[in-house]
Amino acid sequence: MLKEEFILSQERINPYIHNTPILTSETINEIIGCSVYFKCENFQKMGAFKMRGALNAIMQLTEDQRNRGVVTHSSGNFAQAVSLAARSLGVKAYIVMPINAPQVKKDAVKGYGGIITECESTIEAREKNAKIISNEKGATFLHPSNNLEVIIGQGTACMELLHEINDLDYVLAPVGGGGLIAGTALSALYFGKNCKVIGGEPMEADDAFRSLQSGKIENNTTTNTIADGLRTSLGDINFPIIKDNVDKIVRVTELEIVDAMKLIWERMKIIIEPSSAVAVAALIKDCDLFKNKKVGIIISGGNVDLQNLPF
Amino acid sequence: MLKEEFILSQERINPYIHNTPILTSETINEIIGCSVYFKCENFQKMGAFKMRGALNAIMQLTEDQRNRGVVTHSSGNFAQAVSLAARSLGVKAYIVMPINAPQVKKDAVKGYGGIITECESTIEAREKNAKIISNEKGATFLHPSNNLEVIIGQGTACMELLHEINDLDYVLAPVGGGGLIAGTALSALYFGKNCKVIGGEPMEADDAFRSLQSGKIENNTTTNTIADGLRTSLGDINFPIIKDNVDKIVRVTELEIVDAMKLIWERMKIIIEPSSAVAVAALIKDCDLFKNKKVGIIISGGNVDLQNLPF
């Protein structure tokens, strides 16, 4: 049963992750008009929730699979997560990155022991290179969001949150490739008490919003958003979970994202990345819905380039 | 007895402050080579430890004194601390601020209910205006650092830290006007187990370092440092405490301050102000001393102007 899988997953990855703190702020509660509980995955190892899913997937490989390593393509947090999770478990991690990925991200992956293969900056080139490595090395391909073990791993953040605050009325999370929101939705279903799940999504990459409207997976034609973790589209494993278990998706503008990010930096003194600010912006935008409620929010990560801030 | 005063002070102010979290970071421990415990006063109300001292001083006024209000001169965190502490207690706060103080700081003081009087940007003009208000309104003058009740209040941060981690070998704090380091030194004496206290000070405003060398209070001729909270000089109440109880003062350059600030932002995902980074920079600079030790550090505050960052 899937609920059991969450409990097993949390036990499995627990020695390798932080049970991140849950912060509150009177100022934020006053501004928004409800009680907000921030699950701070920005304090997670490598700075984002993605460590959870990567670990859960790699830890379920056979010894033979582990010996042959894992491969993924990513220019962001999942590349770092797979690198660090693999290193923690003594497994080789092959990371396909677009040649134009920021040096700071390549350095981070290398720092965590990931073996980088550079390729052209198209999804086709990335997939092709990952496939070649998978064939050559026998490495297991890990998808960053459309993989049930990854989804369950990501959902352990919400599970920990509900373990501490078990009567949340709502949980919010950002929506990118759909792994976090799907895992969060299942966690809320299994461990919440009638806890509804709301997604935050950039207006400029609103594929999930449109997918829920049309009932099938829609793609983004442009992804002109500062929330670089949310530019990807849903997959066939996470979409059905999202369709059945996510109450609604709130779309926010670029200005709303930056304002929300600045609010949290200034008032809570914690560093959140733009993708996390998308969920905060959704909370602010739809604040009438949350009036006097208890609301959890997954602060997905804190990896920002300090040399390139939007304010 | 002074030790009793710390216990009473902590009980007195406790309902009005946060018992701020103590954070740790494996990455930082690896970099520095010791176990570091960050007492996060950047998460304190109004974003800095100064709330503690302001509250402790105001709460010990007579009812008659409270009715007539309090006055201070400050362009920084103490102005906000007195405003918010006074408002929390239903007391009027008159704040003398230099006319060229940043609008963002004036707005913050107003936001906390402080009544601002603007004056010229000299220490003489500030003191004169505070004196006039004190005479006219009968308001009690509060010095930001050279006041025993303020010193004891500031020391409650270290007291809370030692209550959680009672076998610290060292505690570090930044040195500005001397209130925090004096309170920290007394706390370490009363509540630590042979816990040594080290101050961090900007090379560009190293009056405390020179004062410990000469044995008398030295002033700064220039204060060209980004650590705007540390430009002030010691006073006759805190200096004897510092002289007797602070093990040494480590001076750091402007570059070391900015590098330390960036390290903490990037690795710990928390926002610390330059004055707090001075203590972190001292920890890094003198890391041989701390090798394999348990070291506490008072992260004094997190109030920065995001529009004007040094990186």
Image: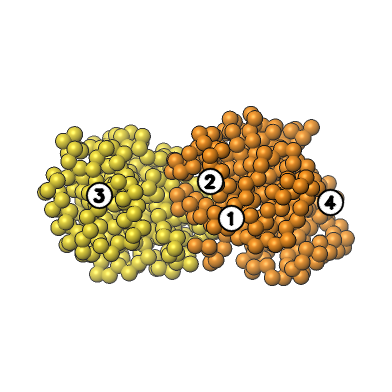
Chain colours: A orange, B yellow
Q: Residue furthest front?
A: A214
Q: Residues within 10 Å of mark 3 (few under 14, many from 20)?
A: some
- Residue B109 visible, this angle: yes
| Both labels 4 and 3 in a single chain | no
Q: Which residue is mark 3?
A: B115
Question: First in sequence: mark 1 or mark 2?
Answer: 1
Q: Residues within 10 Å of mark 4 (few under 14, many from 20)?
A: some
Q: Which mark is residue A65?
A: 4
Q: Which residue is mark 2?
A: A284
Element at label 1: loop
| Both labels 1 and 2 in a single chain | yes
Residue A203 or residue B10, whichever sits in front: A203
Residue A190 or residue A30, whichever sits in front: A30
Q: Chain of mark 3?
A: B
Q: Chain of mark 4?
A: A
Distance between mark 1 and mark 2 Cα atoms = 12 Å
* Residue A206 placement, left or right of A284: right
Q: Residue furthest left?
A: B135
Name the kind of residue labelled 4 in the image.
Gln
Q: Quadrant of residue B208?
A: bottom left
Q: Nearer the viewer, mark 2 or mark 4?
A: 2
Total numbered labels = 4
Question: First in sequence: mark 1 or mark 4?
Answer: 4
Q: Which mark is residue A253?
A: 1
Q: Chain of mark 1?
A: A
